Amino acid sequence: MSNDIIIAPSMLSSDFSRLKEEIEAIERAGMDWVHLDVMDGHFVPNLTFGPPVIAAMRPHTKKVFDVHLMIDNPDLYLEEYAKAGADYITVHAEACTHLDRSLQVIRNLGKKAGVSLNPHTPESVIEYVLDRLDLVLVMSVNPGFGGQAFIPAVVEKIRRIRDMIGNRDIIIEVDGGVAPGTAGIVAEAGARALVAGSAVFKGGNEEAYRANIAAIRKEAEEAIAKQAAE
């Protein structure tokens, strides 16, 4: 498993009236991926944006678009999100009747396949689809809203998933309450992609974003270095 930390700001916390400017600002500020939270008002109690908005954002950066589908019946829309410019498409295990099939479809569309687990969902549900996966997204809050407090119980889940993955080339991503104070904990447990919304976008300008991203990255990298030295 690579020790490189990926910082993926969630556009859910950005200024929606300035999406182009916000994407360009976080890229200059040092982000690695753009995390796009898609919510349908059914699977989660909130609505965000769909393929047309993602397609409108796509020309403004060449960075990875990490699309997280918090929606019912995701199979109906996988091709639309692929065409909109997604690089990774992550579906929820809880929303997929035939998870193996959904992951095959994503890969057949030429995209990286991810699965997300809500805090209450055991990691055992992905045991038989590990060879279909490029990413496992561990929710460290209940999905649907930004700005929630980190749930500490997921740290042990991350460790167990890391052990399940073994030598497979699968990235563990964490979403929810990631900030200085939690970034090191999840990185030590095995997470390498860190989704941060309010912790990145607080301050409202590029200078603040740069400092916020650097602080999260520094804490995560120091935790990994300390672990390696022990």
Image (spheres, grey):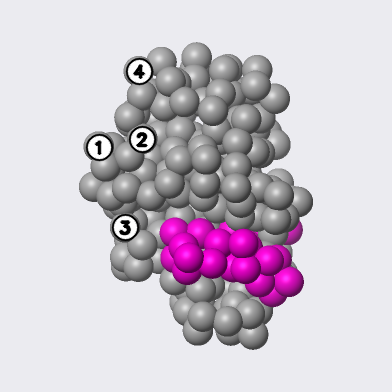
Tag 2 residue = 71
Which comes before the other along the chain, label 2 or label 1? 1
Point out the frontmost of discs 4 and 1.
1
**Residue drawn at (40%, 34%), measured in percent from left and top?**
92
Is label 2 in contact with label 3 (beta carbons under 8 Å)? no
Residue type, label 4? Thr
Residue under pointer 1: 42
Residue 185 against residue 40 in the figure, above or below: below
Q: Residue at coordinates 62% horizontally, 30% vertically from top-left? A: 83
Say which residue appears at 24% left-offset and 47% top-offset.
45
Distance of label 2 from label 3 (alpha carbons)? 14 Å
Rendering coords of residue 11 (x, y %): 51, 59
Residues at marks 3 and 4, CA–CA distance in whole angstroms: 24 Å
* Earlier sequence position, callout 3 versus callout 4: 4
Q: Which residues are magenta?
A: 3-29
Near-viewer residue (20 or 206): 20
Q: CA distance from mark 2 to mark 4?
A: 13 Å
Residue bearing mark 4: 97
- Describe residue 184's horizontal placement relative to residue 225 as left or right: left
| Mark 2 touches mark 4? (CB < 8 Å) | no
- Please, what is the three-letter code of the amino acid marked with disc 2? Ile
- Which of the two labelled residues, at mark 2 and mark 3, occupies the earlier sequence position? 2
- Looking at the rendered image, the quarter that the C terminus falls into is bottom right
Question: Type of residue at label 3?
Answer: Phe
Asked whether disc 2 touches disc 1, contact meaning CB atoms under 8 Å apart, the reply is yes
Report whether residue 198 is seen. Answer: yes
Q: Residue 169 lies in what quarter of the image? A: top right
Where disc 2 sits, the SS reads loop
Q: Which residue is mark 3?
A: 145
